[in-house]
Image (tube, grey):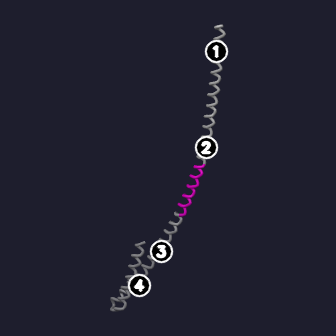
């Protein structure tokens, strides 16, 4: 009868262990499912962020390329304008020298024209330097 009581107690203990094991397994399965769902959401978000990052990179690259093209065109235009201004300056200086020489020969009218041309040449130089 003591043996029978021990056997009954062992069976009861075994049932309790099975019940606890089942409850633990259910809780573990629930936590595992929750972790899997969180992992899938994190992967989805990461893919979304990568897409947003790539789109932003493409926008920035496009904008920088356009700005670079605009700056290169502006540089070309300014260089062209500078060359043109230098040519005009050279021509004005030659005319100025010729008129100055004429003025030295006694022509007051020629001297006034020479001064006007020199002023125009200086203005061209100062306008070119301001750019």
Residue depicted at 63% across the width and 21% down the height: 16
Q: Is residue 74 above or below residue 11?
A: below
Q: What residue is shown with label 2?
A: 41
Q: Where in the figure is residue 12, as x and y percent of width and height?
A: 64, 17
Q: Magenta span: helix, strand or loop, mainly?
A: helix
- Which label sits in the foreground, 1 or 2? 1
Circles 3 and 2: CB atoms closer than 8 Å: no
Q: Marks 1/2: CA distance?
A: 46 Å
Q: Which residue is mark 4?
A: 95
Q: Nearer the viewer, mark 4 or mark 3?
A: 3
Instruction: Check the picture and name the quadrant holding the C terminus.
Output: bottom left
Spatial distance from mark 4 to mark 3, Cα to Cα? 21 Å
Image quadrant where one finds the N terminus: top right
Q: CA distance from mark 3 to mark 1?
A: 104 Å
Asked whether the beta carbons under mark 1 and mark 2 sit within 8 Å of each other, the answer is no
73 and 9: which is toward the camera: 9
Query: Which residue is under mark 1?
Result: 10
Q: Earlier in the sequence, mark 3 or mark 1?
A: 1
């Amino acid at each position: 009868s003591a043996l029978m009581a021990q056997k009954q107690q062992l069976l009861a203990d075994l049932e309790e262990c099975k019940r606890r094991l089942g409850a633990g397994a259910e809780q573990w399965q629930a936590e595992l499912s929750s972790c899997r769902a969180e992992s899938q959401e994190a992967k989805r978000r990461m893919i979304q962020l990568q897409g947003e990052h790539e789109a932003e990179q493409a926008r920035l690259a496009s904008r920088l390329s356009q700005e670079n093209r605009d700056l290169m065109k502006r540089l070309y235009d300014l260089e062209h304008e500078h060359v043109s201004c230098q040519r005009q300056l050279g021509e004005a200086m030659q005319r100025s020298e010729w008129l100055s020489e004429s003025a030295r020969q006694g022509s007051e009218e020629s001297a006034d024209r020479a001064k006007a041309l020199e002023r125009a040449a200086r203005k061209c130089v100062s306008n070119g330097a301001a750019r």
